[in-house]
């Protein structure tokens, strides 16, 4: 079985909410609505609670990159201050040398390490050609310091995601 045929263990956003587009996107102002980077970031689970202007700030510090298959995006146990948003393509995720899943469009790589300043918990490698946005950790911290509404929105979204995990695990009382 090749890496590109390994079933993905992730739960797509569409399955979680039934809505592939955050409803907020229909209320965007014209300048922001035409920016594909802002629209893509609005689809990312972690940023779904952010307003259009907050997404514009995150888009401003995000750099687009095209990556060939085989590109190492991060290595388990190593520091890396950046977060990667997958726009197109698939990457394999390995923990302890064992393939545990994959990530695809709308998902992030390294967001927890960026936010907690911890080491990477997995090795992630491009399985197909990829288009990604790289969010520089230092610049992201500056956005968090100067725009307090961004971390508040992210914290609310993270808490909601954690509640979903408890419910899916059959422990609604913990949510």
Image: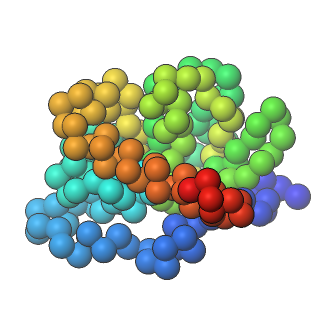
| 45 and 93: which is toward the camera | 45
Q: How is the image coloured?
A: rainbow
Q: Residue at x 78, y 53 (%)?
A: 3
Which residue is more in the foreground, 80 or 19? 19
In x, y percent, where is residue 74?
Answer: 60, 32
Left or right, 173 with respect to 26, comes to right
Q: Which percent across, then down, holds residue 130?
A: 53, 52
Closest to the observer, 148 or 88: 148
Quarter placement of the N terminus: bottom right
**Rendered location of residue 128, percent (x, y):** 63, 54
Which image quarter is the C terminus in?
bottom right
> Disc count in the image?
0
Q: Please provide percent x and percent y for residue 35.
A: 22, 60
Residue 37 visible to an observer of this rendering:
no
Question: Does residue 131 appear left or right of residue 175 in this picture?
Answer: left
Residue at 70% x, 48% y: name it: 92
Q: Residue at x 19, y 37 (%)?
A: 147
Rendering quarter of residue 20:
bottom left
Furthest residue to the bottom?
Answer: 18
- As displayed, is residue 175 above or below residue 76? below
Q: Is residue 148 left or right of residue 72?
A: left
Furthest toward the right, the residue is 1
* Nearest the eye: 4 or 140: 140
Question: Residue extending furthest front?
Answer: 173
Q: Residue at x 55, y 52 (%)?
A: 162
Looking at the image, the residue that sits furthest to the left is: 30
Q: Is residue 145 visible?
A: yes
Q: Is residue 50 above or below residue 79?
A: below
């Amino acid at each position: 079985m090749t890496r590109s045929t390994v079933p993905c263990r992730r739960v797509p956003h569409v399955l979680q909410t039934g809505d592939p587009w955050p409803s907020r996107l229909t209320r965007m102002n014209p300048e922001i609505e035409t920016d594909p980077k802002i629209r893509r970031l609005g689809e990312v689970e972690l940023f779904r609670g952010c307003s259009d202007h907050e997404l514009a700030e995150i888009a401003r510090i995000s750099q687009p990159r095209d990556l060939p298959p085989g590109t190492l995006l991060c290595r388990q146990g190593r520091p890396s201050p950046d977060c990667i948003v997958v726009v197109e393509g698939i990457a394999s995720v390995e923990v302890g040398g064992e393939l545990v899943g994959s990530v695809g469009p709308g998902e992030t790589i390294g967001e927890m390490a960026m936010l907690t300043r911890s080491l990477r918990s997995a090795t992630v490698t491009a399985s197909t050609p990829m288009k990604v946005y790289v969010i520089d950790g230092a610049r992201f911290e500056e956005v968090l310091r100067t725009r307090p509404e961004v971390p508040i929105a992210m914290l609310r979204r993270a808490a909601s995601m954690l509640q979903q995990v408890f419910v899916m695990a059959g422990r609604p009382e913990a949510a």
